[in-house]
Amino acid sequence: MKRRLWTLAPWFIIFSVVMFAMATFTFQYSRALCYIESGIATVSAVLVAAFSFWFRGYIRNMVKNTANHISGFDADYLDRYKYPVVAVGEKGDIFWCNSRFRRVLGSRSPEGESINSYLSGKDVFSIVDSDGTDVAINGKEFTVYALWAGDSVICHFIENTYYKAVLREYNASLPCVALITFDNADDFVTSSEEFYSTVAISVEANLQGWAGDYNAMYKKISNNRYMIIFRDTDVDKMISQRFPILKNIRSIGTARHIPTISVGLARGCKTVHDSEIAARKALEMSLGRGGDQVAIIKDNAYEFFGGTATTTEKVSKVRMRVIANAISRAVADSDKVYIMGHRFSDLDCIGAGIGLQCIMEKSFKKYSKVVVNEETSMARQLIDYAREKLESEVFITPSEAIKGVTARTLLIIVDTHIKTSLESAELYEKCKKVVLIDHHRRAVNYIDNSLVFCHEPSASSASEMCSEIISYFDDKPLGYIQADALLSGIMLDTKNFVLKTGVRTFEAAAYLRRKGANTLTVKEMFSGSIDTYREKVDFVVNSEVFRGCAISGMEKQAKDIRIAAAQAADEMLTLQGIVASFVLFKAENKLNISARSYGRLNVQLVMEKLGGGGHQTMAATQLVNTPLESAVEQLKLAIAEVIDNSEE
């Protein structure tokens, strides 16, 4: 009411001004009327001034009283609150609470207790003036807000048990789309049509049973492709069990043919449409990592389960022919071509580059160079061999390549698909057109802006993939030098045709042999110095065995320590009872771990737990500011976790 009266004050002021004006105008006609009007105007002005003074005093008192309630402690004022309120001293102890606090929280005499016991162990002073914190007390849930009040802290407990229960139920019922594909169905079709039908029916029956266990919706999308829609709360149960469906599917097959599935599962999406799109992305990641696993995506972060089976080789070459045509179009639209691999380039990386460079330059008539840092390369013997035998220089440093980049420059990346592993990330950033060729299992942070993404985790090496691609081009210019380089890459990654060697691997080697590759020349590229051999022996002699894994570490830094470590890891695999080998060494102020296996233990999963990655039989990682002893302990924990999970 007082506030409404104050809003009329401007009208009284206008009235007073008008009356004074009228009094001035009527002075010459009637002095009596002038005096009356002047009197009315004066009274009106006095009333406005008095009311204005009174209202300002009222506002000052109101602000003062409010400030006292906020900055000080008024027990009577706070006790009238309809929700729990508690006052806390400087040391976090309760010295007062209102009656609602005693009744709702079931505490008769909380005085003297620490407020942190009511905050789920959180420190009250860390949440002062924040957006509040959620706590649960006696089966009820609250959001607690803390405010300074003089030297004390006032905590307000706002109960929201019902709303949080509704939110949990909503999140638990969110649709989680799982897209499933039968990875190696083609292998069973090739073996026997009847055998394939039997296995396919068993796979589908297991998937239907999986959906039925959780009352989920099951649908067969197409041949060997399925979709199941779960509730989000069901996914938590699957994670706790580590998806036994993978093991159930593998148990269907025989000794020669083991069926596997890949699953892409999306969480956290509000609609089925969004969940299905995310599930496609997760399935692509699962397939890119070799299949036989579940890839869960939530908020663009991945979680993986499974991945213990060996990747099945793709017998058909149709996809590689399509990729070769796509690369031809990309090369035709460019003015120059750079081929670049990973840092600390090896024979596979450089060999693939030399083979592609020849075709780009002589068949496509494009300026082409292999980008390599010779100082850090582990394939210096191959580089020297190519430089000695070839008529023109085919190598270029990253800094020189960056200077020559144009808007139409094409960059072909081989033997890696991770940006942080590139020989030159700056060159990649400057090139607008990128083609990628790699055989390593897909990592989360892969390069996703390439014109052509040729990724084949079942291939033995990048050199094998490049040999197949080159065979679909005009390969007449490919000579024995390039064939030697490509064959050296295949022999390196297959450990002389022992690991990951399939039909297409031997076909690629036969193709290179027809092109003039000499196995004796290639073998000489693997020879090392006597110092490197001594360092390799030191690694092997000083190794220890942990759960079937050979582990060896060395503090000293040597010139060719990377080569010695890689050779030592290969050598330790030949020891009896060893399923995997891990070599730790220091280089460039970082602790490096090189891992190898014959496939019985997926070393990629072990290295991923330490921040690295790679392939099922060959992986690595780097640790910063980590002592050797600590790194060994972390490695053992990762090995134990992967082995225990694979045995479940």
Image (tube, rainbow, N blue to C red):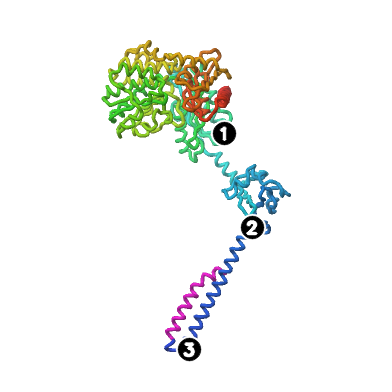
Residue 334, quarter of the rendered image: top left
Q: Label 3 is placed on what type of residue?
A: Ala
Q: Identify which residue, 268 or 397, lies in the foreground.
A: 397
Residue lying at the far right of the rendered structure: 109
Q: Identify which residue, 178 or 130, lies in the foreground.
A: 130
Helix, strand or loop under label 3:
helix
Residue 76: image x %, image y %?
68, 59
- On the question of residue 172 being in view, the answer is yes
* Mark-to-mark CA distance, 3 and 2: 60 Å
The residue labelled by disc 1 is 236
From the viewer's perspective, is 146 left or right of 528?
right
* Mark-to-mark CA distance, 2 and 1: 48 Å
| Sequence-first disc among 1 and 3 | 3
Image point 64% across, 42% down: which residue?
121
Structural crowding at the residue carrying mark 3, measured as other residues with C-alpha within 10 Å and reported as few (<14), some (14–19) or many (≥20): few
- On the question of residue 244 being in view, the answer is no
Above or below residue 217? Residue 252 is above
Residue 182: image x %, image y %?
47, 25
Label drawn at residue 72: 2
* Mark-to-mark CA distance, 1 and 3: 94 Å
Q: Label 2 is placed on what type of residue?
A: Gly
| Sequence-first disc among 2 and 1 | 2
- Whether residue 25 appears in magenta in the rendering, the answer is yes
Question: What is the magenta segment's predominant secondary structure?
Answer: helix
Q: Which residues are magenta?
A: 1-26
From the viewer's perspective, is 145 left or right of 467?
right
Label drawn at residue 32: 3
Residue 534: image x %, image y %?
49, 14
Helix, strand or loop under label 1:
helix
Image point 31% across, 29% down: which residue?
330
